[in-house]
Amino acid sequence: MPRPMRCRRVSFLPDVTYFKPAGIPLSVLEEVRLSVEEAEAMRLKDIEGLEQEQCAERMNISRPTFQRVLMSARRKITDALLNGKAIKIEGGRFEMALSQFKCVSGHEWEVPFEMMVSAPPRLCPVCNTPDFSSLHPRGAVGIRRGFGGRHGRRFRGQ
């Protein structure tokens, strides 16, 4: 039995998640689905210019796994560009590197993933109210770990 797949850590969710060739009606286009972690792999390697080892570390995966994710993303993008297909960024198995929160008084703050696992916030750091909610990152789809799927729901700290 294979071991369970680890979630890949993602630091950025794109605002635009759909691209299509100009002049071709959407109804006749084939679509290529790029997972959120594949988009993150391309961002880290091709935009930030990091070495594969650094990228893998940031995504909390091994270097060979990072290489496979990156090659899959590049293959899909090349297919879409050369064969006139639409690209849709969605889904996958990932966790957010930062969790964002907002209290009832309007204060917002971020908590790194590592702190979410060991000690999730119980009070607003500014006004100490226990009444706050998690902000759901725009465009986010997929599995988020470290905060047990409470994203977007109101809760009280203990």
Image: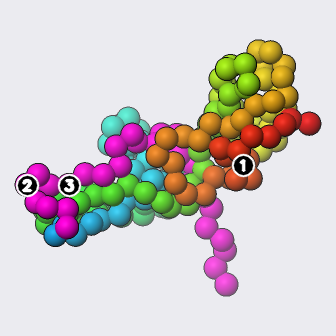
Q: Residue 48: horizontal and vertical position, in percent?
A: 38, 35
- Residue 128's label in the rendered image is none
The amino acid sitting under disc 2 is Gly
Q: Residue at x 34, y 43 (%)?
A: 16
Q: Answer whether labels 3 and 1 touch (C-beta < 8 Å).
A: no
Please tell me how crowded label 3 is: few (under 14), some (14-19), or many (20+) other residues with Cα within 10 Å: some
* Earlier sequence position, callout 3 versus callout 1: 3
Q: What residue would you read off at disc 2?
A: 23
Q: What residue would you read off at disc 1?
A: 150
**Main secondary structure along the magenta-highlighted residues:** loop
Which quadrant of the view contains residue 135?
A: top right
* Up-down relation of residue 97 to residue 22 (above or below): above
* Earlier sequence position, callout 2 versus callout 1: 2
Q: What residue would you read off at disc 3?
A: 20
User: Given the current orientation, which residue lies at the most extreme top position?
Assistant: 126
Q: Residue at x 70, y 53 (%)?
A: 149
